[in-house]
Image (tube, grey):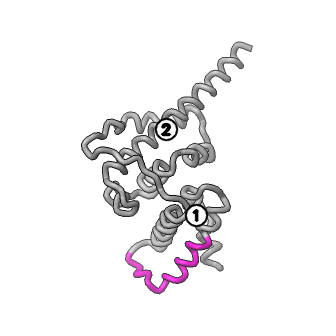
Amino acid sequence: MALFDKYAPMLKGVCLRYAANSADADDLLQEGFIKILDNIPKYTETGSFKAWMKRIMVNNAINYCRKKSKLKFDEINDNLLSDEIDEDQSTDLEARIIEANINPQEIIEIIHKMPEGYRMVLNLYVLDGYTHNEISQKLGISVNTSKSQLSRARKALIKKTEEILNKTNSIKQTAVNI
């Protein structure tokens, strides 16, 4: 129980990023903790215990998503990556989020509304630090499909933050005019 009390809030955050809703996240958390407890004897102490538990939760979430709904990815021609965005656009996204004063809960809601493939790759790459090679192996997709899904997810975030920023600026302008 002490292990659960100490790490559940952090691991619930991981589950919320992958689950469709809070109830599913609770299911993921419970199932993941059972796997953690069952596998504690296998923990080799070569890395951080927190990272080990997080990896179990992420793998559990991926398996859960596979079982619950067939993960859908827009397969692409390996030679065509026209959807890729450059580093400037990625930095611009961060600036837009800050400028629009978008809170973390709003970002989570935006991500949850994305197609499942976008959301899965975005979580794995940006938030969990997996490489495209690792993602392709975990999800059974090509490396270029992983890159494309990430690019499209970023573009979707950019578009949504622009909408929020435009709305915020419109409200500010209206307030100034009044």
> In whole angstroms, how far apart are the C-alphas of marks 2 and 1?
27 Å
Q: Residue at x 40, y 34 (%)?
A: 89
Query: Which residue does the image show at 34% across and 39% down from the upper left?
Result: 84
Does dot 2 land on a helix, a strand or a loop? helix
Side of 26 where 76 appears, left or right: left
- In this view of the protein, which residue sits in the foreground, 175 or 167? 167
- Give the amino acid type for the residue marked by disc 2 in the picture: Ala
Badge number at residue 124: none
Kindly give the residue lying farthest to the top in the view shown.
Answer: 177
Residue for badge 1: 10
Q: Is residue 40 magenta?
A: yes
Location of residue 155 in the rendering, given as x and y in whole percent from the top left corner: 45, 37
In the image, 118: left or right of 20?
Answer: left
- Vertical order, 80 against 37 (above or below): above
Asked if residue 54 can be seen in this view, the reply is no
**Along the line of sight, the residue nearer the viewer: 58 or 95:** 58
Please report whichever mark, 2 or 1, sits nearer to the chain's N-terminal start.
1
Please tell me which residue is depicted at 35% across the width and 58% down the height of the picture.
136
Toward the front, the furthest residue is: 70
Q: Quadrant of residue 99?
A: top right
Q: Main secondary structure of the magenta part?
A: helix
Is 33 one of the magenta-colored residues? yes
Quadrant housing residue 48: bottom left
Q: Using a 10 Å C-alpha cutoff, classify the residue at mark 2 as few (fewer than 14 neighbours), some (14 to 19) or many (20 or more).
A: some
Residue 87: % across, % down: 35, 38
Residue type at mark 1?
Answer: Met
For disc 2, the marked residue is: 156
Give the extent of the magenta segment: 30-46
Image x and y of residue 147, in percent: 35, 47
Q: Is residue 115 above or below residue 102?
A: below
| Quadrant of the frame with the C terminus | top right
Residue pictured at 49% horizontal, 82% vertical: 39
